[in-house]
Each structure stands twice: as C-alpha cells, then as structure tokens.
Amino acid sequence: MAMCITRTTMRIPTTGIAMDEFLWRAGAAGLGLAVIAGPLGSFVVWRRLAFFGDALAHSALLGLALGFMLQIEPAIAIAVLCAAFALTLTGLLSRAKLPPDTLLSIAAFTTLSLGLIALAFVETLRVDLISYLFGDILSVTRADVALVWGGALLALAVLIAIWRPLLAASVDEDLARVEGVDTGRVRLAFVLLLALVVALAMKIVGVLLVTALLVIPAAAARRFAQGPEAMAIYASVIGAIAVIGGLFASLKLDTPSGPSVVVAAAAIFAASLLFKRRA
Amino acid sequence: MNGYAIEGRRLVKRFGDRVVVDHVDIGAKPGEIVTLIGPNGAGKTLLLKMLLGLTVPDGGTIARSPGLRVGYMPQKLAIDPNLPISVARFVGLAGKGDVAASLDTAGVADIAAAPMTGLSGGELQRVLLARALMRDPQLLVLDEPAQGVDVTGQDALYALVGELRDRTNCAVLLVSHDLHLVMARSNHVVCLNTHVCCTGKPEAVGRDPAFAALFGARAGESLALYRHHHDHVHDTHGHVHHAHDHAHSHDGHRHG
C-alpha cells in the first residue's frame, strides 16, 4: 500500500511510488508557476514593482485567514483579498504624499500582522503557518496543480492581450498616454494579474518568497536578452530550471523545497553575472 | 479656436497653496514655432503636460483642433535599464507609423538595431524625435529637445525641427532654457515665470524689460549679437540646407 501522504511535510519523503507522485505534482505546479512568473516578473522588474509585489504577498495571509473564517476556498479568498489590496494600494500610491517605499512598508507589515493575528484565531492552521510563509510545494494536490495551470494560462492569455500597451506604458508612461494608451486601465489589469499570480504562488513558495520567483529569474534573463519578449521567455525557462533544480536539491540534500527553488534561481542569477550583457 | 492647432486659456496649476502656473494663455498655429522660455521651476513642463492632457489643470480651458495628431518629445526618458529594447522597437511602440521613415527623418537610421541603453545624449534626443514623428503629427511638443547635446548638435537639431515645420506645416511648441539657438528660429516667444512675463516676436521679447529682468540685462544684447553671428554662420555653411529648401519649394509636393 502506498504510504500515507501528509500535508504538513516540507521535505521530500522516503522512496516509493508515493514519492514519484509527490514530485510529479510538485514539479507540475512549479513549472506552471514558472510559465507565468517569467513574463509577469519581467514587467515587475521593468516597472520597478518588486516591493509592490512583496506588499501584495504579505497581504495573502490575511486572505487565507479570512478564507478559513468564511469557509471559502483559500486560493480564491487569497486572490480576492490580494486583488482588493492591490487596487487600494494603487489608489493610495497615486494620491499619497508619502514616498512609495514608506507607504508599501506600512501596508505590507500591517497586513502581514493582521493576517497573523487572524490566523491565531483559526486553531487548526497554527501548525501549518511555516508552510504558508515559505511554501510547501510537496503538499500540492492534483486540484492545486490544475488550479495553478489554469490560473497561469489565464493570466498569460490576459498578459499577451495587453502586451503592447503594457510594454509601451512600462517604457514611458507619458509617451504612451500621449499616443492614446489608457495607462490607468493597463496598470489596473497588470496589478490584478499580479494579485492572481501571488495567490497561485502562495502554496508553492509561500508569502515571503513569492516575489523572489518573479524577480530573480527575470533579473537573470536580462543578461541574455536583446528584446522584451526574449527576456520574458528566458525568465520562464530560468524559472523552470530553478524549480526542477530546487526540487532535485531538496530531494538529494533533504532541504526545504520552497527556499531550495529560490536558492537555485539565485544561483542561476549569480552565474548569469559571468556573462556579458548582450543589449 | 482662431486657427490654433492647440490653445490654452487662463491655465492654472496649483500644488497645495502654491500657484505654479498662473493664468497662462498659450497657443500654437499650424506652421508656427512657439517657444516657451523661462528659468527653472517656471512651470514650463507643467504647462506642456496640461496641454498634452497628462496633468489636469486647476483652472482654464484647453481647445484642440478636432482629431489633432500630437507628437511628444519628453524631457527625459524613464526607461528602466533592465528593459532590453532596440531603437527601432522603441520607436515602433508608438503603434502607428513607419519606423524606418521616422528614423531616417530624424537622422538616426544607422542605429535602428542598437539598444536604447547606451545611446549618447544627442542620439537619444533624435530617437525621441523619431518616435514623436511616428504619428505624422500636426502638433509637435518638444520639452527641452537639446538637452545633453553639444552646441553644434543643438543647432542641427533645431534646424531639423525648422525643416520639419516647413515641410509638414505642423505647429511646434517647444520648451527651452536656451536663449540663443531657439529664439532665433521661433515665430513667437512666451517668456514664462509662473505667469507670462512677456510674449511676442523674438526681437520684441529680447528688448522687453521683463525679459531683461528675468534673464539679466545682457541676455537681450547677447541675443541680438548671436542672431547676427548666426546669420553669418548660415552663409558659409548653409549649402546643404539651401539645396534642401530649394527642392521642396520648387515642386511643392508634400510627403505624407
């Protein structure tokens, strides 16, 4: 009989048929995320929204807690809360007199703390907290894999649909506006995509590491790319390699999976520095 | 509209209690080069941004001729160095227009494949001009187009703008700190320091006491001196330009 598959483990279990099943699901979910994280992460880098993405990720815990309290599917609760938070933050950033990094810090730590407090009321979740902070790719279910791929492909389709205006707005917002791009709407669509992907990534790399998966592969891809589309595709490939490499390392070295994926991405980034920038 | 391509009336912009643009009237007609001149913080860029619809004015009205096509050359480009993009691709982001023709007109066809990062100041300005030309503009708005360009480069750039105006009869609205190169080619100068200090033909503005007060008494004199000098330069080096003008004035056909 197959061994019992526990949902709390962060390390790869001992050998057996179950392990293949674990790895297959973990790899599939990770690759699904890498597909969308590459292009979306490239835009995060170009638009200098790394800290914005981080603030969104910090709000995810609150969404999780509310989801449990209101008996809603966690991924949906997180996506909805992240989206609402993203819209609020975008509105605040355009109006507030505070510097953006100060405002984002306040927002990120407030929502993270609120999330932790809310989670303290949900008794059953307390043990799992670390897996929500750092991800638990090995606990993903078949339904999670379907959710990640469905969400990733949906996000990718939307991103491709808004690609040209989004790129024009990311290069120079004023120029794009004079040329007739509705930059406000494009920005809104983009932050909603970001919220969706944060919600998808939560289970895989966790609240604290989500932005790493967006930013690091894109930064590594920059070295090799001569055009925006090339950078987006290379970032997906690098993300995919990091997922596979990280999971493999996790298996061999018995290290936590989410951080292993991030370290693998960072290693590729470090290696990319050895190459001369092409454009 | 009185024949204006774009016209702003009694435009006001405030930041908190501070009035940064104070009841300014400004307009540009087809075929006219209007230069906004003034010290730092005079509200020049802000005025342009209101006319372009990038900033909402706190008072006043803006009228554009119907369906006005605008080409805009911003003061600086906020492009992130992590975004790999070639000159041709950047210019093509305008959406419409002929990239090769625009690059050619702006004199940067040779760097079409070059990355945007690492262009010289002069190259960047011309690439920005190429992008502004993509939509076959009826109004060209240029915010300090000669920034980071050496004097000969500036002169060439303004000559190009003048040539474009002659050829397409577009209205040109440009901002500059520069007293000499620009004013000599302008049809109309608006001297701005939050409010309009003085306005009129370049010669008249150069003699205006308000202009002298803003830029120093010698500015007007040196302007006159420069204009003289400039004419002289043109006589010896104007060969190519003359040939150009000739060809266009003869048959009168237009591109675009």
Image (tube, rainbow, N blue to C red):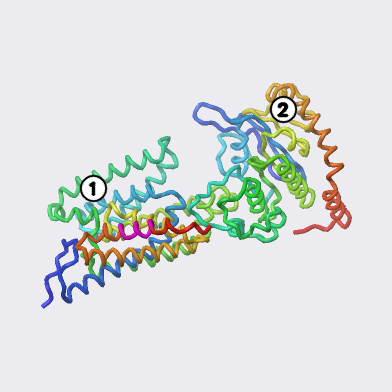
Residue A24 is a magenta residue: no
Q: Position of residue B18 (x, y in %)?
A: 53, 27
- Are dots 1 and 2 on a single chain? no
Name which residue lies at 38% across and 64% down: A238
Asked which secondary structure carries label 2, the reply is strand
Residue A269 relative to residue B109: left or right: left
Which chain hosts label 1?
Answer: A
Identified by mark 2, the residue type is: Cys
Which chain hosts label 2?
Answer: B
Q: CA distance from mark 1 to mark 2?
A: 60 Å
Q: Which residues are magenta?
A: A263-270
Count of residue discs = 2
Quadrant of the frame with the N terminus of chain A: bottom left
Label of residue B198 in the image: 2
Residue B93 visible, this angle: no
Q: Is residue B46 above or below residue A67?
A: above
- Give the labeled residue for mark 1: A115
